[in-house]
C-alpha cells in the first residue's frame, strides 16, 4: 500500500509503456476494484481511499487473490487529481457513489464540482473515460449541469458497457433497498486551454 496522505510528490504508477491504467477513486471496501482487477489482469488498477481500515482489508483480499495488477493508495481524491498523479496517466477513472451531502448547508462539502472536474482532466489521457455513479437523484442532476460546462467531456455510454455488471459495495447496498443507482460516462476528447 502506498501512503500518499500529507505528501507533496508525484506518485509514478509503475505502468509499462502503453499499459491501460484505471483509477477507482474512493474505492471504499474495494469490491468493485477487486472485480475489475480480476476481469482485466493485463491492466493496472489503482484503488484509492482515505480510510486505512478499508484499505488494509482490501490489501488482504488482494493478496489472497494474487492480484499483482491492483495497487492501493491511501490518498485524498483532491490531492490525487491536483498533483499526486502525473499528467495524462489515467485511461478510465471511476468515482462511484461519493457522499452526496444532501443537506443544503452541507453541499459545500461535495467532491464533484467544476473545480474538481477541471483538476481531473489533468490526470486523464486524451480519450479517457470518466465514470460517475450515485443513488442521489439531485446530485446526479447537478453533475449533468456541471458537466455541461465541459464540452470536451462528451457523453460516452459505451465507455462503461464492459463493466455494467460490476457493482460497488454501496451500489449493491442501495439496490437491496430498492434505490436505483444512476451511472454516467464521459470521454475526454481534448484538453481545454
Image (tube, grey):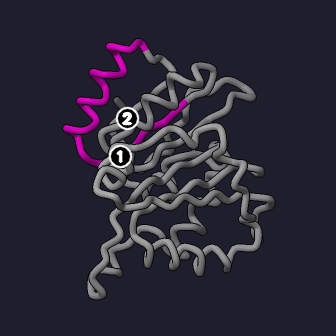
Identified at 77% across, 50% down, the residue is 127
- The span from disc 2 to disc 1 (Cα, nearest Å) is 10 Å
Q: Residues within 10 Å of mark 2 (few under 14, many from 20)?
A: some
Which is nearer the eye, 176 or 40? 176
CB-based contact (under 8 Å), mark 2 and mark 1: yes
**Residue 172: mark in rendering:** 1
Q: Which residues are magenta?
A: 45-66
Q: x, y (%) of residue 15? A: 62, 27
Residue under the image location 57 percent in, 48 percent down:
93
What secondary structure prevails in the magenta region?
helix
Relative image position of residue 110 (x, y in whole percent): 38, 72
Rendered position, 146 above or below 160: below
Is residue 162 placed above or below 76 in the rendered structure?
above
Looking at this view, name the residue that lies furthest to the left. Answer: 53
Which image quarter holds the C terminus? bottom right
Q: Which mark is residue 36?
A: none
Q: Is residue 68 magenta?
A: no
Q: Secondary structure at mark 1?
A: helix
Along the viewing direction, whichever of 91 and 192 lies nearer the viewer: 91
Q: Which mark is residue 31?
A: 2
Q: Position of residue 74 (x, y in %)?
A: 33, 42
Residue at the far right: name it: 190
Which residue reaches farthest bottom?
105
Amino acid at each position: 500500500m502506498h501512503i500518499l496522505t500529507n505528501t507533496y510528490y508525484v506518485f509514478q504508477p509503475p505502468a509499462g509503456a502503453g499499459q491501460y491504467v484505471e483509477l477507482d477513486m474512493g474505492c471504499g471496501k474495494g469490491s468493485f476494484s477487486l472485480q475489475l482487477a480480476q476481469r482485466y489482469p493485463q491492466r493496472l488498477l489503482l484503488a484509492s481511499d482515505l480510510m486505512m481500515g478499508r484499505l488494509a482489508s482490501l490489501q488482504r483480499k488482494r493478496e489472497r487473490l494474487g492480484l499483482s495488477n491492483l495497487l492501493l493508495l491511501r490518498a485524498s481524491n483532491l490531492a490525487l487529481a491536483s498533483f499526486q498523479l502525473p499528467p495524462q496517466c489515467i485511461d478510465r477513472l471511476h468515482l462511484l457513489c461519493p457522499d452526496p451531502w444532501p443537506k443544503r448547508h452541507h453541499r459545500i462539502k461535495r467532491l464533484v464540482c467544476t473545480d474538481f472536474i477541471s483538476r481531473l482532466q489533468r490526470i486523464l489521457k486524451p480519450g479517457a473515460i470518466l465514470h460517475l455513479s450515485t443513488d442521489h437523484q439531485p446530485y446526479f442532476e447537478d453533475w449533468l449541469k456541471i458537466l455541461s460546462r465541459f464540452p470536451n467531456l462528451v457523453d460516452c455510454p459505451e465507455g462503461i458497457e464492459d463493466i455494467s455488471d460490476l457493482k460497488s459495495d454501496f451500489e449493491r447496498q442501495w439496490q437491496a433497498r430498492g434505490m436505483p443507482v444512476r451511472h454516467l460516462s464521459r470521454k475526454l476528447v481534448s484538453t481545454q486551454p
